[in-house]
Amino acid sequence: MSFSSEEISTLIPALLLGIGLSAASGFRVFLPLLVGNLAGKFGVYDLADNMAWMGDSTTTIVLAVAAVFELAAYYIPVVDNLLDTIAMPVAVAAGTILTSSFLQIDDPMLQWGLGLVAGGGVAGTIQAGTSLLRLGSTKFTGGLGNNLIASVENGFSAVLSIVALMLPIFIGAIVLYFVVWIWRKLIKQRRQKASV
C-alpha cells in the first residue's frame, strides 16, 4: 500500500499524537483515553471513521468515571500494586486504541497493526517501568512512597496527554527517543549479564 505525500502529512502527526497519548496511558490508562475522546468529540483531531465511537458522549461519561476511580485507586495501599498486575495488558490495549483512533487508514490491518506496534508498544514499555518503580518503592519504603509515585504518575499522564494534543510531533518524537533509549539500556544489561 502506498501513500501520497498529502496522506503522509496527515498520517505522521496522527501517529505521533497516538504515540504521545499512548505513553501517557502507560502512566494511567483512562485519563489519556478521556483526553483522546474529548479531542475527537470537539474536533481538535479527526477520528478514524471506524473509531467514531471514541468521540461519543456515552464514551465520555464512561471514561470520565473510570479515570476518576483509577486516579483515586492508586492512593490506596495494596490496591495500587494489584492495579499494576492488570495494568500492563490494559495499557497496551489503551495505547493500541488511542493510536488506531487517529490513523486515517483504509486498511484495518495496517491501522490496527500500527496501533498495536507503535501505541501498544510504547504504553507497555512505560507501564512496565512504572510497575517496577512502584515495586521498588513498596520494597524500600514499605509502601509509604507509593502515594508520591502515584501523584507523579497522575501528573505525568495529565500533562503528557494535554501537551501531546498541542505538540504531537514534538512529544511523539521525544517519546520514541525515550522508548528506544530504554530498550537499548535493557538489551545492553542483558548482554552484560549473559557474558558474565
Image (cartoon, grey):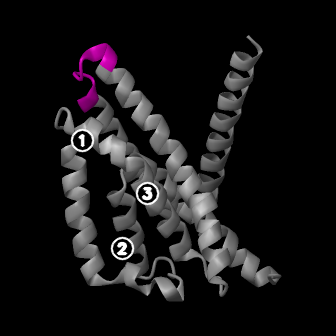
**Label of residue 194 in the image:** none
Q: Is residue 38 left or right of residue 102?
A: left
Q: Amino acid at mark 3?
A: Ser
Residue stretch in magenta: 139-147
Q: Is residue 166 above or below residue 151?
A: below
Report the quarter where the N terminus lies.
bottom right
In this rendering, position of residue 166 left or right of residue 65: right
- Secondary structure beneath label 3: helix
- Asked whether residue 168 appears in the rendered view, the answer is no
- Vertical comparison of 93 with 142: above or below: below
Alpha-carbon neighbours of circle 2 within 10 Å: few (<14), some, or many (≥20)? some
| Residue at the image point whose x is 42% and y is 69% from the top | 36
- State left or right for residue 58 relative to residue 177: left
Mark pair 1, 3: CA separation: 19 Å
Mark-to-mark CA distance, 2 and 3: 11 Å
Taking the spot 50% from the left edge, 57% from the top edge, the residue there is: 22
- Kind of residue at badge 1: Tyr
Q: Which residue is mark 2?
A: 38
Q: Which residue is mark 3?
A: 161
Residue at far top of view: 196
Image point (50%, 81%), residue name: 47
Q: Position of residue 189 (x, y in %)?
A: 68, 22
- The reply to whether discs 1 and 3 touch (Cβ–Cβ < 8 Å) is no
For the residues bearing labels 2 and 1, Cβ distance under 8 angstroms: no
Query: Where in the figure is residue 171, as x and y percent of width and height?
Result: 58, 53
Residue type indicated by callout 2:
Leu
Query: Is residue 146 part of the magenta span, yes or no?
Result: yes
Dot placed on the residue nearer the N-terminal end, 1 or 3: 1
- Give the residue drawn at x 40%, y 46%: 27
Image spot of residue 9 (x, y percent): 73, 76
Work out whether mark 2 precedes mark 1 in sequence or the reverse, and give the earlier one.
2
Q: Which mark is residue 74?
A: 1
